[in-house]
Image (tube, rainbow, N blue to C red):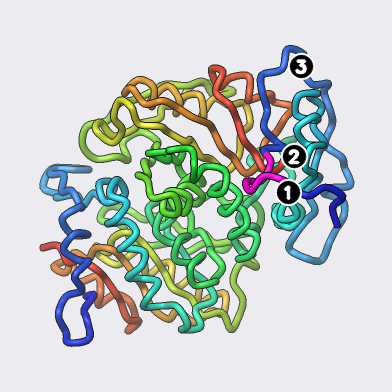
Amino acid sequence: MFPFSSSASAPLAHSLRLPSPSPLPPRTPPSHLYRLGLPNFRRRLLLLRSVSTAVRAMASEGGEDPRLPRIASTIRVIPDFPKPGIMFQDITTLLLDHEAFRHTIDMFVERYRDKRITVVAGIEARGFIFGPPIALAIGCKFVPMRKPKKLPGEVISEEYSLEYGTDIMEMHVGAVQPGDRALVIDDLIATGGTLAAAIRLLERVGAEVVECACVIELPELQGYQRLGGKPLFVLVKAA
Amino acid sequence: MACGKDGEQDSRIGGIAASIRVVPDFPKKGIMFQDITTLLLDPKAFKNTVDLFVERYIGKDVSVVAGIEARGFIFGPPIALAIGAKFVPLRKPRKLPGEVISEKYVLEYGTDCLEMHVGAVQPGDHALVVDDLIATGGTLCAAMNLLERAGAEVVECACVIELPELKGREKLNGKPLYVLVESR
């Protein structure tokens, strides 16, 4: 089905995005995505080609992992949620497809199992779904990064910006130590604000953030630019 | 309780119980909060926890694992992946996009609401409900109601920890409850 076979045992990080000097051109969401009117519960999610030359070069080396179309096809797009104009990327339909969910976890595990990761930090709440299976498979700690006042005992807090106002993310004191090598997981990266807060929390306690990993990226929002130079790995880019 | 075939406690339980941290007076005075985050920091304890549930449910025709937000999201998915079941998140109001069904339930003061996606679960599905802890049983009861309203059969409720004094077990409409650790 695919013209290129991966020579390396680990799948290519073909969605790996390094900070790009030029912004992506604005793009309106294709209207056919939500006007398809499929009777089926699932909708098709476009797999975008990367526009960065660095990523394009990597993608052409090995071709697309054959598991990705299945993963992408299980993600449902809900228009106007949580408010008008937002096309919400719903991963709950991915979780209903056992094989797609398995593939998603496998792709992250294959990438990180030999990277000496000692902690997976998952962002509440959908990061709690993807983070623990990865942590279990690679044999490392799982640390939940939570909204305020959810974690009992001593915490450290990090404020971050929202579209309107701010929010706070908390992590337990003592969960992570200097020298820990951390992976930050969430289902999706939009503006990157939440991931950036998680990175700051981990770095404040002396951990090294190795990478941020998400199932979905919204590339137009250029969240990868806000990760303090930390690399981002995603499986699917959404229009 | 998790027991071996002779009725003895499974040897993994001790390590699991020891990894759970009790935080006094959280979220308010008088409550001894059972904190599973320290279990999650112990890869062996976390793996043993998941394995105990998986060993119980694998091959038992469980087609859905429903996890209650948010700590049920930590334990439910690894179980679902291992036994080949769908994972369905049961969430606080207005978190799930698209069409949902809602179930109200009673808190100590006031009420709360649990939601599930329409179409996630079908008649004929056999469901396992997972949360980190059962206290009064109110949340688990709401979860079971949602699943049954969608036509699924709830096979069992599974929690890491039970607070037996709160008698949540009795509120599950006769459905069985499986826990690894009792906390008194």
Q: Would you name the residue on which mark 2 appears?
A: A238
| Magenta region includes residue A11 | yes
Query: Looking at the image, which is closer to me, A151 or A184?
Result: A184
Which one is closest to the eye, mark 3 or mark 1? Answer: 3
Mark positioned earlier in the residue sequence (2 or 3):
3
Q: Amino acid at mark 3?
A: Pro
The chief SS type of the magenta part is loop
Reading the image, the residue beneath label 3 is A23
Viewer-side label of 2, 1: 2
The crowd level at tag 3 (other Cα within 10 Å; few <14, some 14-19, many 20+) is few
- Of the two numbered discs 2 and 1 on the same chain, state the one appearing first in sequence: 1
Side of A68 relative to A212 (left or right): right
Compared across the picture, whether A111 is left or right of A177 comes to: right
In the image, is residue A121 above or below residue A177? Answer: below
Badge 2: chain ID: A
**Amino acid type shown at disc 1:** Val
Residue B172 picture quarter: bottom left
* x then y, percent, for residue B116: 54, 62
Identify the residue shown where x is 58% and y is 84%.
B124
Residue A19 lies, in percent from the top left, at 66, 19
Q: Residue at x 33, y 27 (%)?
A: A179
**Do the residues bearing badges 2 and 1 touch, measured as CB atoms within 8 Å?**
yes
How far from the left and from the top, in percent, is residue B82? 48, 68
Dot 1: few (<14), some (14–19), or many (≥20) neighbours within 10 Å?
A: many
Secondary structure found at label 3: loop
Gap between marks 2 and 3, in whole Å? 16 Å
Instruction: Tell me where residue B173 sits by quadrant.
Output: bottom left
